Image (cartoon, rainbow, N blue to C red):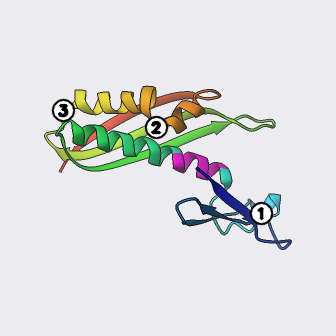
Amino acid sequence: MEVKVSWNGPSGMSFRAETGSGHLVSMDGAPEGGGHNLAPRPMEMVLLGTGGCTAYDVVLILKRGREDVRGCDVTLKAERAEVDPKVFTKVHFHFTVTGRNLKPAAVERAVNLSHDKYCSASIMLAKTAEITHSFEIVEG
């Protein structure tokens, strides 16, 4: 896996990234750090990538278990250290899983398998952060 990140120039702290799969992503810094708030911060990208990784796992595990999953949202709330390096110290994942007749035990199993075995991003974050998770099921 490879990505290339390039600074957009001296007028700010924005960057463009090109992924190995050919997609472009923008990032920008906070105004107090010289950015213009035109795109997500790099650490927000770490969180959103982690959310995508674990949501992918949960949906895949439920589908493989023949559960009638129709939607999956995950909200991540994180705290960071006060001093450099400002690593994540706590991250809470809240899943809202929508489907028909979803079994709570199946959803809980999918979330646990993602966090304990499959989601490389959340497993990496767990090296510095206390990871917690919760879920709710919506019939639909």
- Say the numbered circle drawn on residue 103: 3
Where is residue 133 drawn, in percent x and y? Answer: 43, 31
Residue drawn 34% across the image and 39% down it: 58
Name the residue that disc number 2 marks: 93
Position of 35 relative to 135 (above/below)? below
Magenta segment range? 43-49
- N-terminal of the two: label 1 or label 3? 1
Task: Compare residues 1 and 24 and report the one nearer the observer.
Answer: 1
- N-terminal of the two: label 2 or label 3? 2
Position of 56 relative to 114 (above/below)? below
**Label 1's element?**
helix
Where is residue 9 drawn, in percent x and y? Answer: 82, 72
Asked if residue 59 lies left or right of residue 39, the reply is left
User: How far apart are the two marked residues, 2 and 3, measured between alpha carbons?
Assistant: 19 Å
- Say the numbered circle drawn on residue 102: none
Where is residue 122 drawn, in percent x and y? Answer: 52, 35
Q: State yes or no: residue 111 in magenta.
A: no
- Say the numbered circle drawn on residue 31: 1
Asked if residue 95 lies left or right of residue 80, the reply is left
User: For the residue marked with disc 2, what is the amino acid?
Assistant: Phe
User: How far apart are the two marked residues, 1 and 2, measured between alpha carbons?
Assistant: 28 Å
- Category of crowding for the residue at label 2, using alpha-carbon neighbours closer than 10 angstroms: few (below 14), some (14–19), many (at least 20): many
**Label 2's element?**
strand
User: For the residue marked with disc 3, what is the amino acid?
Assistant: Lys
Residue drawn 53% across the image and 29% down it: 131
User: How far apart are the two marked residues, 1 and 3, measured between alpha carbons?
Assistant: 46 Å
Q: Main secondary structure of the magenta part?
A: helix
